[in-house]
């Protein structure tokens, strides 16, 4: 059966049998022996005994809403344990029968001091009589009476019975004054009337119970019982052994469970017997009752302290500590089983109590089922423990009173405060009891009051208590449910700090919030330090001396000096712990605590009960701002990066909350009277006006009318019910209006100039109203929080008055100050006392707090807070800049109007160009959020955002695209949409763009332009239900808008190329960058885009017609017309069939008389291209109709009137019409085409021999020749002769000029025209050659085999040879590029296959073999034969030639027609083209593509590329020194605000995978260093090689190294080469000049001295005849000299110690702290190699001796460095990564 526990803490011994004793008194306490369940809280003893419970309610008054968790009202609702009857078996023992006769019935509580004296004396005498009887019986009967006394001590822990303890407790209840009168008062305790000797006899007896209770450990002892039970049940001897369960241990029936009956004591341990736990609980309950009685006696005024021994108080404190730590915390947290070793249970059967518990570990968690059994069984112990919460609460309250009235020993104070602080670590578990969280909160709040009392009473211990709080923070619960358990009211700041409440706060069902108990404790401690303000300086100084408070500030008269000191210490200690590096001191755990603390402070700063929140936030903001500014000027490795992030986040939260308060007050100000003359109330309105602040309408509920303004309010909102309606009721606004005027009349200065009221006067009235509210709350609820809050408010008011200008406002500040101080003492609440007339609702009080907070010191300092953030936005640390931008983002999200400030906008604009990607991204995010909140201001940041679309950072580009996407979707008429769309389309068209950015752009345009459901979306983004006709109308309107936007984009960009790329991608997918996970989304976008194209084409046609109807025939109309046609041409390329229905609309534009003058050529060109594309989709009837009209004639006329671009388009359209499958033989269009070809051919034939140089001819002749060549070449290219395929072996003899024009047909036109083009190619002027090449290109494209003929005739060699002019070379390369692109399109589009299938004479084998593609490789094969010449053209002196050849090489690489291994070195060489950035960029793009495909190959070819780059600059650029070109490996860069230098290969290294792999980096560096090594097969080095070595050394010295191992690798190998080869060179020098061979470089020799002095004479030194040998040795020295200088530079630039160089091994692993390095500021490494020999081979003695001297000197320096090893560097090298410093060679952050 389940044991049932009684619920009273007293009366144990009097219920030894099943008799029940009821105490009928004013306490109405009842006991039920039959019920052993825990009594409900309503029937608890504490409820009736609490002296603070208010039992009377006045129905006529409005009951105020008391503070949540009032500490002095807590225990009136907490159950207390009933008396637990002892074991029933004892009634059969004669000893107990005799003892039972001695039990005295309970007596009613005394009514006078004499009765109290008599009751105490009677109880003490009874105890003494029992002791005397026990001693006498022991002498007579042996052990009977002694056993009776032992039973009493075992079951009660002392000499008193439970009845006697209950009677003494009742004396405390009726003799103890209210705990609110802690400093004494009229109600004095009657304990002072009891005789001192009697009390001296009573207290030792009570102390015996306390001492016994101190030794009780119910949880530990119960754990032993459970472990014993588990062991017994798992034992094979289970059936033969008695079993005890935890329930039997805790019940009064002493009996074993199971069939194995056994006498008591069989287990050998009395603590493990059945009923032992019951007895231990009685001892604990009696001890708690005795402790309460002792504390009541000690805290009572007038009681002589000598009647209580010193160790009595210590025993009470120890019992309180033990009960908290051993009982309450484990019971509420359900942690009594934590730390128990399951292996001990299984092996030994006992955990041995506390001794054998394993340490608590987060990582180790047993899954043994025994742990669950233990935890579940312990609940039988937890339940009776939790029934003691009421008694324990009373103990803490009386300890609180004792602390306030008496001096205590320091050790006891610390023990008491430590025990109270430990209650904050309770993590209440609802598994133990449903109301466990409430019980834990009750204990915590009462403990907080006790700590506050100690803190207030003992100023000298405040520092120690604050220090104790911080270790406690690390033990607090961290789960979301347990983190915040302290109940507070909901305030105006209860919403997230990132949101601003618009308008007055509305009512909410949940009218409360929760904060952390540690935050509430901190605020309570600060508010507890306030003292009464002084009237003058002398009084203040005297008060400070009397208080002996070392924290007092002598110049502060407000009484807040202690609060300020606590705030300073708490802030300093908290931030010091957060700022520690790494995990030192739990810094990583304190940082989230700081963040949570600030969140809680921001939550309660609008609550009247916590005015200290504003002060603490103020000091936190000051300290955080100082730390951030100090970090700005500190060394980069002195501040923990994580702390900076936490500090900036916290600083941003505070600043944003302040901005929100100011905005809330600015947008919803109080409407208070501005004059002392109050206007008369308005007459009662005819209609009922609902002005309730909740915002709800006239609900079916009780409402009340304001007697002044006659507005109606909900009774539930203002706290009035039907039964509590006052005679006169005013709403909050009217109350404020009348109160302000009334107060102004009382406190107005007599010498005022006017009756006008200022905001300062208003604040005085608002403070008084708030003070009245707090006073009423403190009186009604006896809340310490309210009491301390009102005192803090008074002191703050006085401080504000001291700093105010007396001339501002009409209030007499001195009078106000005196009145505020006069309210310091809280008056006692009288029975039936009415609430003050001028009181406000909760909403009114919140509005007051909002107004006062907005004028507080924290909000006044907003400009300073904002200034700190703005200053840090320009800091030198990128991390601080990024964090500050994020902080300003929080502020702007609260108050977007701040972005209008010039200082803010200036800093934000500067961050757009910051060198750090993260800072730029944060700035873009800031502006994006700002724009979305204020769309009308988007234009102000349009240009900066447009620049970020091409930013180097991918994240920045993504963020910019998202911003524009959101802006365009939310505002389709955005003014900058055209430029934004154009910029995004350019990014999407870039093949090197990141897939994520490209997909984001595609998604944006798909949503904007191709979303089939876009017109069907309502305002909420969900499909709207509409009729089909309405949907059609919406779709048409949507497409019209989209088409207009597309036209605008094309017009601005000037070309439809980018739009064409986007549309093709959306319609047909993208060839590169596809990701599998994106394929589904892309296919969906393609389907939507396909369905939209038809509607868009129709909309564009309508737009075209509308344009024609509304055009003004202005010059600018042509640009709009071209844009419309170009946009239409985009869809014509993708879906030509969509244009067919609209051909009749387009054909008239071919007339060329569109009235747009200079745009006519572009118009006819666009229309011709669309007709050309759509021609294949014409039906036979449509074709006949069009060709029988004026279409062919118009196309022919274009060829005579417009430029070559229009001619090409018109010829293509005419040729496509002639080649149409349904076109008849000798059709109109074919005749027109032949006639056109004959005329142009005849003209060229006639003028071919007129001159060899057309540049001397008239312009008209040159123009006609240009037109004829362009038209004839286009005809040869686009017209396809049926059955005119070339043979495999084409003879050059067929290409003959046909002189008889009559014989000219379209079938033989190509051969004759090609021969004619050859004639013009032989002309002397370059322009004619280029035109002839362009015309020949048409033949090459249509007939690839003609390329072979051109190769045989030497045409290709001649046009790309050195003899050809640069313009001809450029044109030839452009022609080859066009041929490759045309062939690629022909194969990809399937045109070649379709052409072959249309030919009937093609065999099946050729079709299967793919012979249709045979011609496609001819052009590429021919170019491959000229690859060496193509590579040579990369060294051309003409920039345009170099650019064109790189472009052509790119196409050859993409089509696989050229060897990448041979090409990459030449592309690397072009990186040396420092004077042509566009060519370098194009070559870099090709290198990046190859690096992605073959990274190893790129690394292997860089060394060859260095040589090629050196020779490139030597050959291409003109020289300045002795006819030699100036070669450099460095180029200037501009990266953000800093300018610097980089090598020509930096971009290659950064974009390739080499940078991330150590082996590849070292392979690259080793390959470059090997250039300096001496070739084993050569006896001596070449002097011609030296400039290239200087070039290579510049590359090595300025590479973008990211790990210290790279410069160490170079230094290591440089030292090896210098040691091996350098010493040999020194020895050879010594032999040659006659020096010391044994020590050839010990000191400066004569050659060095004479060279330094400029007096070198070879003959005098005997070197004149040794010039050749000396020069060659100087060459060898010059080979090593760059490495020596490089080693010296790297050591200094990267601050590498000699110790690190000595310990370095190339095979070692990279050290973490040596990654992320950066080079020190300073000039780049540069080395200039002087010539040792002149042009005739003679030695230059001046240069040779300089090299000789430099070499010897640097070799000596290197030897000295090798001998002297620095134990520790004087300065750490720079680092970019934030890592922990680890050694002497560590690099520092940059």
Image (spheres, rainbow, N blue to C red):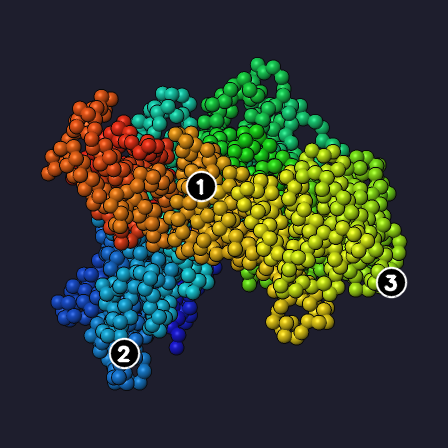
Residue behind mark 3: 1181
In the shown orientation, is residue 344 left or right of residue 54?
left
Whichever of callouts 3 and 2 sits on the residue coming sooner in the sequence is 2
Q: Position of residue 950 (x, y in %)?
A: 56, 43
| Element type at mark 2 | helix
Is residue 1557 among the parts visible in the rendering? yes
Q: Which residue is mark 2?
A: 232
Please state if 364 lies on the left or on the right of 1168 as rendered: left
Q: Residue at x 57, y 14 (%)?
A: 751
Label 1 secondary element: helix
Q: Residue at x 81, y 61 (%)?
A: 1178
**Badge 3 density bin: few <14, some 14–19, many ≥20, Cα 10 Å:** few
Of tags 3 and 1, the one toward the viewer is 1
- The spot of residue 248 in percent (x, y) is 32, 74
The residue carrying mark 1 is 1512
Closest to the observer: 963 or 1089? 1089
Point out residue 1787 in the picture as x, y percentages from the top left corner.
Answer: 31, 42
Q: How far is disc 3 from disc 1 in space, using C-alphas?
A: 63 Å
């Amino acid at each position: 059966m389940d044991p049932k526990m009684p619920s009273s803490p007293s009366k144990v011994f009097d219920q030894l049998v099943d008799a029940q004793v009821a105490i009928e008194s004013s306490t109405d306490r009842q006991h039920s022996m039959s019920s052993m369940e825990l009594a409900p809280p309503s029937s608890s003893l504490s409820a009736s005994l609490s002296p603070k419970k208010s039992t009377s309610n006045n129905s006529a008054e409005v009951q105020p809403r008391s503070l949540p968790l009032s500490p002095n009202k807590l225990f009136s609702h907490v159950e207390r344990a009933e008396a637990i009857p002892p074991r029933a078996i004892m009634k059969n023992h004669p000893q107990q029968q005799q003892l039972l006769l001695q039990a005295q019935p309970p007596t009613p509580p005394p009514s006078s001091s004499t009765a109290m004296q008599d009751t105490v004396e009677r109880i003490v005498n009874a105890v003494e009589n029992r002791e005397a009887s026990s001693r006498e019986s022991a002498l007579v009967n042996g052990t009977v009476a002694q056993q009776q006394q032992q039973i009493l001590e075992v079951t009660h822990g002392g000499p008193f019975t439970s009845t006697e303890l209950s009677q003494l407790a009742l004396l405390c209840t009726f003799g103890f004054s209210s705990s609110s009168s802690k400093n004494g008062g009229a109600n004095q305790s009657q304990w002072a009337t009891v005789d001192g000797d009697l009390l001296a006899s009573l207290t030792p007896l009570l102390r015996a119970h306390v001492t016994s209770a101190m030794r009780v450990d119910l949880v530990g002892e119960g754990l032993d019982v459970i472990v014993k039970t588990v062991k017994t049940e798992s034992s094979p001897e289970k059936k033969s052994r008695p079993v005890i369960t935890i329930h039997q241990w805790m019940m009064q029936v002493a009996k074993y469970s199971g069939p194995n009956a056994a006498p008591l004591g069989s287990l050998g341990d009395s603590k493990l017997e059945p009923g032992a736990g019951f007895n231990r609980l009685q001892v604990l309950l009696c001890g708690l009752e005795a402790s309460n009685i002792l504390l009541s006696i000690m805290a009572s005024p007038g009681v002589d302290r000598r009647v209580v021994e010193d160790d009595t108080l210590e025993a009470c404190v120890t019992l309180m500590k033990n009960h908290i730590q051993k009982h309450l915390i484990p019971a509420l947290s359900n942690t009594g089983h934590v730390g128990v070793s399951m292996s001990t249970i299984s092996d030994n059967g006992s955990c041995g109590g506390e001794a054998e518990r394993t340490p608590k570990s987060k990582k180790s968690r047993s899954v043994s089922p025994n742990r669950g059994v233990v935890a579940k069984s312990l609940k039988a112990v937890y339940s009776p423990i939790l029934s003691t919460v009421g008694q324990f609460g009373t103990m803490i309250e009386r300890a609180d009173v004792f602390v306030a009235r008496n001096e205590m020993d320091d050790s006891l104070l610390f023990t008491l405060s430590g025990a109270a602080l430990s209650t904050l670590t309770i993590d209440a578990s609802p598994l133990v009891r449903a109301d466990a969280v409430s019980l834990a909160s009750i204990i915590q709040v009462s403990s907080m009051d006790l700590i506050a009392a100690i803190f207030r009473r003992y100023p000298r211990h405040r520092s120690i208590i604050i220090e104790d709080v911080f270790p406690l923070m690390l033990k607090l619960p961290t789960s979301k449910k347990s983190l915040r358990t302290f109940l507070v009211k909901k305030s105006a700041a209860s919403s997230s700090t990132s949101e601003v409440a618009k308008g007055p706060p509305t009512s909410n069902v949940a009218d409360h919030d929760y904060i952390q108990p540690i935050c509430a404790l901190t605020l309570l401690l600060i508010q507890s330090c306030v003292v009464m303000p002084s009237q003058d300086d002398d009084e203040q100084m005297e008060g400070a001396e009397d208080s002996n408070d070392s924290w007092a500030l002598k110049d502060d008269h407000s009484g807040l000096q202690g609060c300020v000191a606590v705030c300073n210490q708490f802030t300093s200690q908290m931030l010091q712990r957060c700022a520690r590096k790494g995990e030192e001191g739990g810094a990583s755990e304190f940082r989230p605590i700081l963040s949570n603390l600030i969140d809680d402070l921001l939550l309660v700063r609008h609550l009247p009960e916590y005015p200290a929140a504003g002060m603490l936030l103020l000091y936190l903001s000051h300290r955080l701002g100082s730390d951030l500014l100090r970090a700005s000027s500190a060394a980069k490795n002195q501040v923990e990066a994580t702390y900076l992030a936490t500090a900036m986040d916290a600083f941003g939260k505070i600043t944003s909350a302040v901005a929100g308060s100011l905005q809330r007050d600015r947008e919803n100000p109080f409407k208070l009277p501005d004059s002392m003359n109050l206007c008369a109330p308005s007459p009662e309105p005819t209609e009922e006006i609902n002005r309730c602040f909740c915002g709800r309408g006239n609900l079916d509920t009780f409402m009340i009318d304001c007697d002044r303004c006659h507005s109606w309010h909900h009774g539930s909102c203002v706290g009035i019910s039907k039964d509590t309606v006052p005679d006169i009721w005013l709403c909050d606004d009217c109350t404020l209006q009348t109160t302000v005027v009334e107060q102004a009349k009382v406190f107005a200065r007599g010498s005022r100039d006017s009756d006008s009221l200022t905001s300062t006067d208003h604040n005085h009235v608002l403070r008084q109203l708030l003070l009245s509210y707090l006073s009423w709350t403190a009186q009604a609820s006896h809340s310490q929080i309210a009491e301390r809050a009102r005192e803090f408010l008074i002191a703050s008011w006085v401080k504000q008055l001291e700093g105010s200008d007396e001339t501002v406002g009409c209030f007499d500040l001195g009078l106000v100050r005196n009145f505020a101080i006069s309210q310091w003492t809280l008056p006692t609440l009288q029975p039936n006392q009415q609430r003050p007339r001028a009181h406000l609702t909760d909403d009114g009080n919140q509005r007051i707090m909002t107004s006062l907070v907005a004028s507080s010191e924290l909000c006044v300092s907003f400009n300073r807070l904002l200034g700190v953030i703005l200053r840090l936005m320009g800091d030198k640390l990128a991390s601080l800049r990024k964090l500050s931008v994020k902080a300003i983002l929080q502020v702007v999200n609260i108050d977007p109007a701040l972005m209008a400030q010039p200082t803010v906008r200036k800093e934000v604009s500067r961050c757009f160009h910051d060198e750090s990607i993260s800072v730029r991204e944060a700035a873009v995010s800031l502006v994006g959020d700002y724009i979305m909140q204020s769309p009308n201001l988007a234009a102000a940041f349009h240009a900066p955002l447009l620049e970020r679309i091409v930013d180097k950072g991918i994240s920045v580009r993504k963020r910019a695209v998202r911003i524009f996407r959101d802006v365009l979707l939310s505002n389709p008429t955005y003014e900058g949409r055209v430029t934004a769309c154009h910029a995004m389309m350019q990014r999407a068209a870039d093949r090197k763009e990141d897939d994520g950015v490209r997909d984001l752009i595609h998604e944006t345009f798909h949503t904007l332009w191709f979303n089939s459901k876009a017109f069907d979306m309502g305002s909420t983004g969900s499909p709207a239900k509409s009729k089909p006709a309405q949907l059609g109308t919406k779709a048409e309107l949507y497409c019209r808008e989209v088409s207009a936007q597309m036209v605008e984009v094309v017009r601005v960009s000037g070309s439809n190329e980018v739009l064409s790329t986007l549309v093709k991608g959306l319609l047909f997918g993208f060839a590169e960058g596809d990701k599998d996970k994106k394929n589904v989304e892309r296919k969906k976008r393609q389907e939507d885009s396909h369905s939209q194209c038809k509607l868009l084409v129709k909309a564009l046609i309508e737009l075209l017609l509308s344009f024609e109807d509304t055009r003004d025939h202005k010059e600018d109309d042509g640009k709009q017309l071209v844009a419309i046609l170009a946009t239409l041409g985009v869809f014509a390329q993708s879906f030509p069939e969509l244009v067919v229905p609209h051909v009749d609309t387009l054909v008239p534009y071919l007339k060329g008389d569109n009235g747009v003058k200079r745009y006519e050529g572009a118009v006819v060109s666009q229309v011709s291209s669309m007709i050309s594309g759509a021609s294949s989709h014409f039906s036979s009837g449509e074709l006949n109709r069009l060709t029988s009209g004026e279409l062919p004639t118009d196309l022919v006329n274009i060829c005579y009137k417009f430029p070559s671009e229009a001619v090409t388009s018109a010829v293509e359209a005419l040729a496509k019409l002639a080649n149409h499958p349904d076109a008849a033989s000798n059709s109109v269009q074919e005749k027109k085409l032949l006639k056109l070809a004959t005329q142009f051919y005849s003209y060229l034939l006639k003028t071919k021999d007129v001159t060899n140089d057309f540049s001397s001819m008239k312009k008209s002749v040159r123009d006609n020749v240009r037109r004829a060549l362009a038209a004839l070449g286009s005809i040869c290219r686009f017209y396809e002769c049926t059955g005119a395929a070339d043979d495999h072996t084409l003879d050059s003899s067929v290409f003959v000029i046909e002189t008889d024009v009559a014989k000219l047909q379209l079938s033989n036109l190509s051969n004759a025209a090609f021969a004619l083009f050859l004639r013009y190619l032989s002309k002397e002027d370059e322009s004619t050659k280029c035109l002839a090449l362009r015309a020949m290109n048409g033949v090459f494209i249509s007939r690839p085999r003609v390329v072979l003929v051109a190769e045989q005739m030497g045409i290709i060699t001649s046009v790309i040879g050195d003899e050809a002019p640069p313009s001809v070379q450029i044109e030839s390369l452009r022609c080859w590029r066009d041929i490759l692109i045309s062939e690629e399109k022909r194969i990809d589009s399937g045109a070649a296959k379709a052409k072959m299938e249309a030919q009937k004479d093609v065999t099946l084998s050729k079709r299967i073999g793919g012979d249709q593609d045979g011609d496609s490789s001819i052009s590429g094969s021919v170019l491959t034969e000229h690859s060496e010449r193509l590579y040579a053209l990369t060294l051309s002196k003409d920039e345009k030639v170099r650019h064109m050849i790189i472009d052509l090489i790119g196409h050859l690489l993409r089509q696989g027609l050229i060897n990448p291994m041979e090409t990459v070195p030449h592309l690397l060489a072009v990186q040396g083209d420092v004077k042509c950035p566009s060519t370098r960029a194009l070559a870099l793009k090709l290198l990046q593509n190859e690096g992605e495909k073959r990274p190893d190959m790129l690394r292997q070819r860089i060394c060859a590329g260095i040589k090629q780059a050196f020779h490139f600059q030597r050959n291409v650029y003109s020289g300045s020194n002795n006819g030699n070109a100036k070669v450099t490996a460095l180029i200037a860069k501009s990266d953000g605000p800093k300018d610097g230098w980089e090598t020509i290969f930096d971009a290659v290294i950064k974009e390739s995978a080499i940078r991330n792999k150590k082996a590849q980096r070292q392979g690259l560096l080793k390959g470059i260093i090997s250039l300096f090594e001496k070739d084993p097969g050569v006896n001596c080095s070449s002097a011609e090689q030296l400039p290239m070595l200087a070039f290579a050394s510049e590359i090595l010295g300025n590479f973008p190294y990211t790990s210290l191992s790279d410069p160490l690798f170079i230094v290591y190998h440089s030292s090896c080469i210098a040691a091996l080869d350098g010493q040999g060179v020194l020895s050879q020098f010594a032999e040659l000049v006659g020096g010391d061979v044994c020590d050839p470089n010990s000191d400066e020799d004569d050659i060095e001295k004479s060279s330094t002095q400029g007096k070198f004479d070879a003959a005098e030194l005997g070197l004149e005849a040794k010039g050749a040998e000396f020069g060659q040795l100087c060459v060898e020295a010059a080979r090593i000299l760059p490495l020596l200088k490089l080693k010296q530079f790297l050591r200094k630039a990267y601050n590498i110690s000699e110790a690190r160089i000595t310990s370095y091994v190339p095979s070692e692993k990279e050290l973490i702290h040596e990654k992320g390095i950066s080079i020190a500021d300073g000039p780049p490494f540069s080395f200039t190699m002087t010539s040792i020999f002149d042009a005739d081979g003679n030695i230059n003695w001046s240069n040779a001796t300089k090299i000789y001297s430099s070499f010897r000197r640097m070799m000596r320096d290197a030897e000295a460095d090798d001998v002297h090893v620095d134990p520790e560097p004087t300065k750490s090298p720079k680092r970019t990564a934030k890592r922990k410093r680890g050694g002497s060679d560590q690099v520092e952050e940059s």
